[in-house]
Image: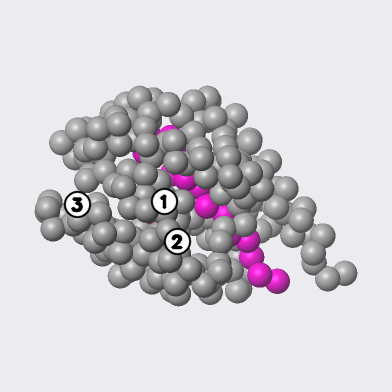
Amino acid sequence: MRGRFITLEGLEGTGKSTQIELLRERLSARGLRVRVTREPGGTPLAEKLRELVLHADSAEISPACELLMMFAARAAHLQGVIQPALAAGEWVLCDRFTDASYAYQGAGRGIPDAQIRSLEDMVQAGLRPDLTLLLDAPVQVGLARATGRRGAAAADRFEREGQDFFERVRAKFLDIAAHEPGRVKCIDADRPLEAIADDLEAQALKLLSLHEKNQPA
Ligand code: TMP
């Protein structure tokens, strides 16, 4: 039986990396085979693209170039990791996916949704997450945590953006959640770690009960 594909989204500093590890532990404890991965990244080629798109100090990376790098990394990641893992029955937990392209390159950089959709159709050939967990918090909360963690000097190309950029990104994530309430669950990330982890686990377990119902007897 095919595994399930769960993505985590949210602004920087909303605790995605910590939460994805907690979710891995909790799902593994239930006997599921879980694969944790991230975007951009997840394969050697996609990690090289990640390094370039996040850290290249270059005006050469236009919005279109940035979008294409995200989807180039995604194509490699789907082929090399996500598709084989799902086919082998693993549950894939992915730190960011295509909703981030609509939020950052779409709302953030101004690329029309229709252009992003055509790349999504080309690269994903119908594959969409079964569940997306959106960790939502006010922009200031996330940014304060993200810069506190790394220091302003070590900020990547996105972390150097201003509040307006992140307000557009956050609004887009919330808009996607409002339009796709079946797939995208919005979780208040401005709460204690354990409370957030409990909510994420509860959402994933709903998928597990659907999964079990669909298992042949
Ligand atoms: P993070 O994984 O440490 O949060 O960093 C990844 C950065 O890449 C983050 O700022 C969001 C950005 N990003 C996009 O702009 N578009 C995308 O499609 C993805 C997957 C990430």
**Which of the two residues, 101 or 216, is positioned nearer the viewer here?**
101
Give the number of the disc on residue 19.
none
Q: Judge whether 190 appears above or below 176 on screen.
A: above
Q: Which residues are magenta?
A: 1-20
Residue name at image x 52 percent, y 25 percent: 191
**Quadrant the C terminus occupies:** bottom right
| Marks 3 and 1 in Cβ contact (< 8 Å) | no
Residue 17 falls inside the magenta stretch? yes
Q: How far apart are the alpha carbons under marks 2 and 1?
A: 9 Å
Helix, strand or loop at mark 2 = helix
Tell me: is circle 1 under 8 Å from ligand 1.
no
Q: How far apart are the alpha carbons under marks 3 and 2?
A: 26 Å
Give the number of the disc on residue 117.
2
* For marks 3 and 2 on the same chain, the one whose residue lies earlier in the sequence: 3
Q: Residues within 10 Å of mark 3 (few under 14, many from 20)?
A: some
Residue name at image x 83 percent, y 71 percent: 216
- Name the residue that disc number 3 marks: 55
Amino acid type at circle 1 is Tyr
Helix, strand or loop at mark 1 = helix
Image-quadrant location for residue 115: bottom left
Q: Judge whether 163 appears above or below 125 on screen.
A: above
**Quadrant the N terminus occupies:** bottom right
Helix, strand or loop at mark 3 = helix
* For marks 3 and 1 on the same chain, the one whose residue lies earlier in the sequence: 3
Q: Judge whether 124 appears above or below 155 on screen.
A: below
Give the image location of residue 14, x and y in percent: 43, 35
Give the image location of residue 18, x and y in percent: 46, 40
Q: Is residue 49 left or right of residue 173?
A: left
